[in-house]
Image: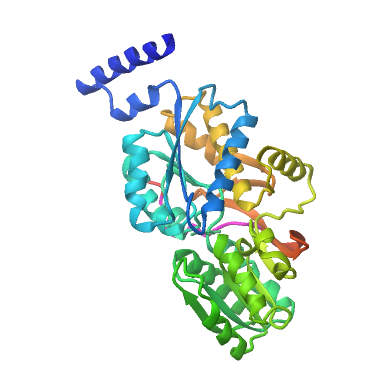
Amino acid sequence: MTTRRLVLSRSAAIVGAASTGLLLPEIVRAQSAKVRVGFMLPYTGTFAQLGVAIENGVRMAIAEQGGKLGGRDIEWFKVDDESEPSKGVENASKLVQRDKVDVLIGTVHSGVQMGIQKVARDSGVLNLIPNAGVHAATRALCAPNVFRTSFSNSQPTLALGEAMVKRGHKKAVWITWKYAAGDEAFEGFKESYTKAGGTIVKELGLPFPNVEFQALLTEIASLKPDAVACFFAGGGAAKFIRDYAAAGLKGKIPLYGSGFLTEGVLDAAGPAADGIITTMHYSDSLDTPRNKQFRTAYATQFKMQPDVYSVQGYDTGLLLAQGAAAVKGDLSNKAALYKAMEGAVIDSPRGKWSMSKSHNPVQDIYLREVKNRENVVIGTAAKALADSGAGCKMG
Ligand code: PHB
């Protein structure tokens, strides 16, 4: 009670000062006793599990750091963004304007991220992106207050093309959901595959989050490529893997993908996933003490296996904790906060990584194969891969 009264009277004084124009509303917000952290993630729809895995990861990392940020307690807020781009700005504004969060953690879907990006740029609120790979977020629309802890959409597939050609697959069909994530994953694939001497015989697509794959699988069967490469994720990915096998293509036309295809879906996909080869900045089987300790702790706490989304959430928590510690919890000290986050080296279960100048991870990309419900590392497809950051000017 005492604390609350203290906070109220202190914020009343600050609001008084603000109304005389002495303080900006932003400063009023930064002075409140608890750090306000908002999750804007999908908790329904085809990416629902991704949102949960990310939130689990963030909470676990912060709990391991003592459950505080730079010595301050945390108040959590949550919005289900439903992976619905048309509500992106509105949902981000709920957290920023209504809940007055100090940090917005979100999101998964590239189209929804475009809404967050706008709100983050307009308001100056710190935004940590724990998944959405949309290029613009760390290229033309990059911002000092936006940091991504995951990947850019073309990063995993830039490592895929050469791996496929090396395995003798010279003619491929590409298939994806037609939206920013699929289109930009294709950019990476096209560059790497054609450079290595491969030919893309056909690009196939369907709208997100449609899962009526049948007609497209029939077309793949008649095209008879050497291999298929794709971008799908979440519930839709599990269905694609099962439908691919049910259509009789498994074992005839090898299936490749950016690694999201086989993340968090291996139980749902079952044996239909065996043998799928993907490229990704994480693998379940990474044989390091850091990864093993993380996997055991996560499985014990949440009663399920972690995946790349849990890792990205975890790293988001680590980054935020490091930044907050550097400014002793004073998140209004933006210059020092951003400098600490820009210089952070994240000791991740995926391996250590650092931020590029445009605030995207510089990271290794692994080649993995699904064996018995696990993404097993079979090689390194790229070392210290950075996104180009093309067009990024930190204002
Ligand atoms: C995206 O929309 O950026 C996205 C969604 C799910 C993934 C990867 C990327 O697994």
Horizontal relation, residue 115 to residue 34: left or right: left
Q: In this view of the protein, can residue 124 be seen by the observer?
A: no
| Camera-side residue of 60 and 133 | 60
Examine the residues drawn in magenta and state their main secondary structure.
loop
Residue 27 figure quarter: top left
The outermost residue toward the bottom is 222
Quarter of the figure with the N terminus = top left
Q: Is residue 387 magenta?
A: yes
How far across and down, in percent of the image, does residue 230 sit? Answer: 58, 72
- Is 269 rendered above or below residue 354? below
Horizontal relation, residue 88 to residue 367: left or right: left
* Residue range highlighted in magenta: 384-393
Task: State how many labels appear.
Answer: 0
The outermost residue toward the top is 2
- At 31% from the left and 37% from the top, the residue drawn is 97
Q: Is residue 215 magenta?
A: no
How far across and down, in percent of the image, does residue 116 sit? Answer: 39, 49
- At 73% from the left and 76% from the top, the residue drawn is 166
| Camera-side residue of 165 and 57 | 57
Q: In this view of the protein, can residue 25 be seen by the observer?
A: yes
- At 42% from the left and 8% from the top, the residue drawn is 2
How far across and down, in percent of the image, does residue 356 sit? Answer: 55, 50
How far across and down, in percent of the image, does residue 286 sit? Answer: 76, 52
- At 38% from the left and 38% from the top, the residue drawn is 125
| Camera-side residue of 275 and 377 | 275
Colour scheme employed for the rendering of this structure: rainbow
Horizontal relation, residue 265 to residue 187: left or right: right
| Camera-side residue of 358 and 310 | 310
